[in-house]
Image (cartoon, rainbow, N blue to C red):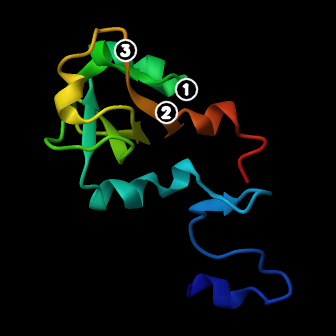
Amino acid sequence: MRRATSVGRDRLISLGVCFGKFTKTRKFKLHITALDYLAQYAKHKVWIKPNGEMSFLYGNHVLKAHIGRITEDTPEHQGVVIYSMADVPLGFGVTARNTIDIRKLQPTDIVVFHQADVGEYLRDEDSMF
């Protein structure tokens, strides 16, 4: 904020980190720029194996075969932060099932629906902001 004071108000476009934007239907869509802040305070986390990282970073959902660990008692349709096995935040999504049901699934079943990942910086660079 201190650096922004050296720019005139008529020339200042924005200040801070863009967490997301409102769609035309007035719903808020989180951007991947919010990941660092979400990861600090996330109650529910999912760690994916190295063989599933690239799939997730290309915008695909997380399959049961890719799950390394998951926070206990994670409910269905809960927002989660996706981590690599080295505890690097990769993105966020929404669980498709609760933790108990996930254990009973087939390896090809979807566990977490993809919402955003760090690969978006490269894929959607032109339309991001």
Q: Which residue is drawn at 64% across and 33% down?
A: 122
Q: Is mark 2 on a helix, strand or loop?
A: strand
Query: Which of disc 3 and disc 2 is earlier in sequence?
Result: 3
Q: How many marks?
A: 3
Question: Mark 2 to mark 3: distance in Å?
Answer: 14 Å
| Residue placed furthest toward the right | 10
Q: Which mark is residue 114?
A: 2
Q: In which quarter of the image is the N terminus?
A: bottom right
Query: Which of disc 3 and disc 1 is earlier in sequence?
Result: 1
Q: Quadrant of the C terminus?
A: bottom right
Q: Which mark is residue 90?
A: none
Q: Nearer the viewer, residue 47 or 11?
A: 47
| Relative side of 24 to 60, left or right | right
Q: Is residue 13 above or below residue 52?
A: below
| Residue placed furthest toward the left | 72
Q: Residue 59 carries which label?
A: 1
Q: Which mark is residue 109?
A: 3
Q: Is mark 1 on a helix, strand or loop?
A: loop
The amino acid on which the numbered mark 2 sits, given as a three-letter code, is His
Which quarter of the figure has residue 16?
bottom right
Q: Indicate the position of residue 23 as horizontal and vertical percent values.
A: 74, 56
Question: Mark 2 to mark 1: distance in Å?
Answer: 7 Å
Q: Mark 2–mark 1 contact, CB under 8 Å? A: yes
The amino acid on which the numbered mark 1 sits, given as a three-letter code, is Gly
Query: Which of disc 1 and disc 2 is earlier in sequence?
Result: 1
Q: Indicate the position of residue 4 as horizontal and vertical percent values.
A: 65, 84
Q: Which residue is drawn at 49% across and 33% down?
A: 114
Q: Indicate the position of residue 7 as horizontal and vertical percent values.
A: 74, 85
Q: Which residue is drawn at 70% across and 36% down?
A: 124
Q: Is residue 111 above or below residue 65?
A: below
Q: Which of 55 and 5 is in front in this view?
A: 55
